[in-house]
């Protein structure tokens, strides 16, 4: 679902569902959340980059999963309990910067 690598003090998280246009399903959501938590808890890291394999960075929620379960997380959790709601706190590595994070297209 994702590739996670560390280059020096930078963690690179790559979404890896190019056939599904990197749509976020329950597995990808959990893997991404786990990777962000790992970045946040590693004091040796100064930055995190989210990239994507394929021509599309991320098409959003996996609509096939939403259609079958009514929830992008794919289970019975309330729709609010997703990676977006779980990440409203500023991670440790982001609090150190006074500038806003930048987004860039896929690799």
Image (spheres, rainbow, N blue to C red):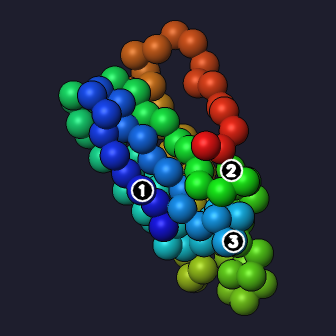
Q: Nearer the viewer, residue 81 or 28?
A: 28
Q: Residues within 10 Å of mark 2 (few under 14, many from 20)?
A: many
The x and y percentages for residue 45 are 29, 29
**Which label belongs to residue 3?**
1
Residue 90 against residue 37 in the figure, above or below: above
Q: Earlier in the sequence, mark 3 or mark 1?
A: 1
Q: Residue at x 72, y 89 (%)?
A: 68
Residue neighbourhood size for the residue with mark 3, other residues' Cα within 10 Å, grouped as few (<14), some (14–19), many (≥20) = some
Q: Residue 20 — which label?
A: 3
Q: Could you tell me which residue is drawn at 31 percent across and 34 percent down?
A: 7
Which of the marked residues, 2 or 1, is nearer the chain's N terminus?
1
Of all residues, the one furthest to the top in this rendering is 98
Q: How far apart are labels 3 and 1 at the CA level?
A: 16 Å
Mark 2 residue element: loop
The x and y percentages for residue 30 are 45, 65
CB atoms at circles 2 and 3 under 8 Å apart?
Answer: no
> Residue sitting at 45 percent across and 25 percent down?
94
The percent coordinates of residue 54 (x first, y second) are 66, 57
- Up-down relation of residue 14 to residue 27 (above or below): above
Q: Is residue 106 left or right of residue 45?
A: right
For the residues bearing labels 3 and 1, Cβ distance under 8 angstroms: no
What residue sits 40% from the left and 27% below the top?
Answer: 47
Alpha carbon separation for disc pair 2 and 3 = 11 Å
Q: Please tell me in which quadrant of the rendered image residue 12 appears.
A: top left
Question: Residue lying farthest bottom?
Answer: 68
Q: Which mark is residue 57?
A: 2
- Label 1: which secondary element: strand
How many labels sit on residues? 3
């Amino acid at each position: 679902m994702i590739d996670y690598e560390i280059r020096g003090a930078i963690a690179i998280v790559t979404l890896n569902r190019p056939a599904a246009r990197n749509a976020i399903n329950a597995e990808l959501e959990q893997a991404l959340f786990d990777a962000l938590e790992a970045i946040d808890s590693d004091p040796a890291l100064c930055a995190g980059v989210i990239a994507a394999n394929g021509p599309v960075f991320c098409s959003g929620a996996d609509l096939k999963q939403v259609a079958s379960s009514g929830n992008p997380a794919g289970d019975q959790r309330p729709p609010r309990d997703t990676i977006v709601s779980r990440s409203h706190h500023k991670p440790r590595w982001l609090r150190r910067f006074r500038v806003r994070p930048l987004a860039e297209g896929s690799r």
